[in-house]
Image: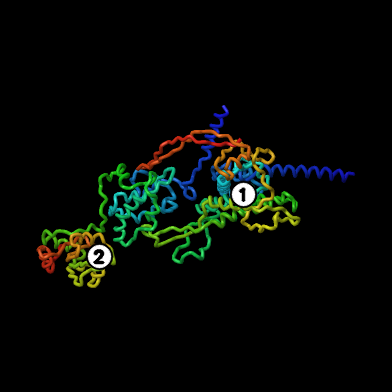
Amino acid sequence: MMLAAFALLLLLLGIGAMPNGHWEHQGTSRCVPIPANMALCQGLGYSSMRMPNLLGHESPAEAVQQSTSWLPLLARECHPHARIFLCSLFAPVCLERIISPCRSLCVSVRDSCAPIMNCYGYPWPRILQCDQFPKDHLMCISSVANLQNGTSNEGRVVPRASCTDCELEEATSSKELLDLFCKSDFVVKVRLSKLNSSSSVLTMFFLGSRLEVLKHGPLLGGEMRSRLTLWLERDATCVGNLTRNHPNGGTFLLTGTVTGKRLLVNKAFSWGKRQRHLNQAARKWKSHRCRG
Amino acid sequence: MDVRMNQGHLLLAVTLIVCNSQLLVVANSWWSLAMNPIQRPEMYIIGAQPLCSQLTGLSQGQRKLCQLYQDHMVYIGEGAKTGIKECQYQFRQRRWNCSTVDNTSVFGRVMHIGSRETAFTYAVSAAGVVNAVSRACREGELSTCGCSRAARPRDLPRDWLWGGCGDNVNYGYRFAREFVDAREREKNYPRGSVEHARTLMNLQNNEAGRMAVYNLANVACKCHGVSGSCSLKTCWLQLADFRRVGEFLKEKYDSAAAMRINRRGKLELVNNRFNPPTGEDLVYIDPSPDYCLRNETTGSLGTQGRLCNKTSEGMDGCELMCCGRGYDQFKTYKHERCHCKFHWCCYVKCKRCTSLVDQFVCK
C-alpha cells in the first residue's frame, strides 16, 4: 500500500520535474498562419509557421519582405528543394520543437544555387552558412533521399547549375543563325585561350587579343572586351560548358543578352574551318535587314 | 487620574492598530498577481476602480499605481510569474526549492525570515517585472512607452545602423522601481528597528534584481539587404535571456552579504573584513533555517519525500538533501519519448521507451 503510494508519488514528481521550454527561443515563440502574400512558402504542405523564425525575423511582415528577394533565384529552379530549404528558415514548421534544415540539405542547395547567385553578383549569404545547421539526424529536414517520399519531385535529378543554360549549339542553317543574331543583343567572335599558370582555379581561360564584333547592340565599342572579361570571370558554369570539349580553348561565336551592366551568353557556336553555315551567316549579316 | 486613564486607552488602541497592520502586511504580497492571472486587460477600461481594489496583495501605493497604469498590471503579473519560475529552476536541487504554498502569500512564512533565500526571491521577482514591462513596451502593448531610445553604443562599427525597435529597459527599470518599491516606501518603522532593517534589505535586493536585467541587456544585430547578405546591418538593444539573469542573481545569492542595522538606521556589514556590497549585490539580515524538517513557525516544508541523487555529493545528493535522515530506494518504470523523427510534411513521430530506474526519496 505504502509502496504503491510512493510509486505514484514518484511518477507525479517525475512528470512535474520534467524540464520544458528548453527549445524555446528567447522570448515566446508562437504559431502564426503563413501569410497569403508569402509567395516563397505557399503550397509546401503546411500552413502555419513559427515566429520568430530561424532567421530572427520578429513579425510575419518582416519575413515576407525579406523572402521576396529570393523569388527570382527560385524561378531559375536551381535546386528542386531550394524552396523547402529556404522556407524551413523563413517559415519554419510549427511543432513542439524547432525543426531546422540538415546540413546536407543546405550543402546540396548551396552547391546548386550559389553559382546562380554568383552570376548575379551575390555571394552565398552569411545567414545561410551551412555549418550552422546540424549534421543529419532524425529531427532535421534532410536531403533529397528523405524528401523524395513526400514530394512530387520524385525521380528528378539534381540539375547542374547554369546561369542561362548556355550550351554549344550546332549551326543548322545560315538563315537560322541570322534570326538568332537579330534576336540577340550582341554577337561576337572570340578566341579563348587556356591560361598557362594554374594560379587561379576558377578562371582558366583568357580572351584573345582580337574581337570580331558582328553586333554591338547596346554595348559601345570599347565595352565589349570588359564585359566579356567579366563574364569569363563570373559565369564559370557557362564557360565550362563551352570548353568541355575544347580543354585548350578555341574560337567561338557568342550570342546573348545585355542586362544593365551584365552580359549573358545564351548560345554559342564553335567556330571551326568546316563551319560553312557560320561563315555564310557572318558574310550575309553585313547586308542583312532584320524584320521588325 | 483621568489623564492617566486616557493614556492607557490610547496605548491599547495604538497597539491594536499596529498588530492589525502587521497582520495585513504579513498576509499579502504583489507576487500573488502571478498566481491569479489577469485574463482580460480590457476589463480595466470598463471598471477601473473596483478591479484595482479587488486585486489581492497590492499595497495602498501599488493600488494607486494600478489605477494610473491599468494596462501594466498584466505584465507585472507575468513578470512575477517569470521570477517565480526562474527561482524554482535555480533552486530545483536545493532543500528549499522555491515552492509556492498558496495563491495569496505565495511562498508562505519563509519570506518573513530575512534570509539569503528571501533576498534572491525579492531580486528575481523585481527582475521579472523589468523584463516583462520592457518587452511589453517594445511590442506596443503599453500606452505610456514604446521602443527603446537608448543611445548608440560607442563601440558599434560605423557602418552598422542603430535603430530597430529595442526592448525599453530604461522604462521597465523605472516603472519596476516605482511599483515594487512602493510597498517598502510606505512603511514607517522606527529607525534602527528590526522592521526597518528588513525594509532596507528589501529595497537593496529589489534594486539588485532590476540592475541585473538593466546591465545584462545587450546589442542584437540583424542582417538586411538582398538575399540576406550582410550588406546592411541593423542593431538594437535587447533583453538578455531571463535564464542568464537568473544565473547571475544565483551567483549573487551565493556571495550575498550578511548585514545588520546600526543606530543611524543604515545597514552595515556584520563582518567588516568583507567589501561593502554594491548596488548590484544581494544582502540578508537573518541566518537561513536548515530547511530540513517541516516547521510551521519558519514556514519550512522540509525535505521528507523529496527526490535525491544517490551518487551526488552536492546539495542534491541524498546525504545533504535528506539531512542525514536516510532515504528510501524504489524501482520505478520511466516512460519517455525516444527516437523521434521528423516526417515531411509535417509531423514528428516518436517511439515510447520504457526503462526501469532507481529512485531515491528522503525519509
* In the image: residue B29, left or right of residue A171: right
Same subunit: marks 1 and 2? no
Mark 2: secondary structure: loop
Residue A201 at x, y percent in the picture: 28, 64
Mark 1: secondary structure: helix
Task: Kindly identify which chain the residue marked by label 1 belongs to.
Answer: B
* In the image: residue B351, left or right of residue A243: right
Is residue B178 visible to the viewer in this orientation of the structure? no
Kindly report which numbered mark, 1 or 2, lies closer to the viewer in this rendering: 2
Mark 1–mark 2 distance (CA, rounded to whole Å)? 67 Å
Query: Circle 1 is placed at which residue position?
Result: B120
Residue B243 at x, y percent in the picture: 53, 50
State the residue in front, A214 or A78: A78
Residue A151, by quadrant, is top left
State the residue in front, A84 or A43: A84
Q: Residue at x 26, y 58 (%)?
A: A163
Query: Circle 2 is placed at which residue position?
Result: A204
Task: Kindly identify which chain the residue marked by label 2 belongs to.
Answer: A
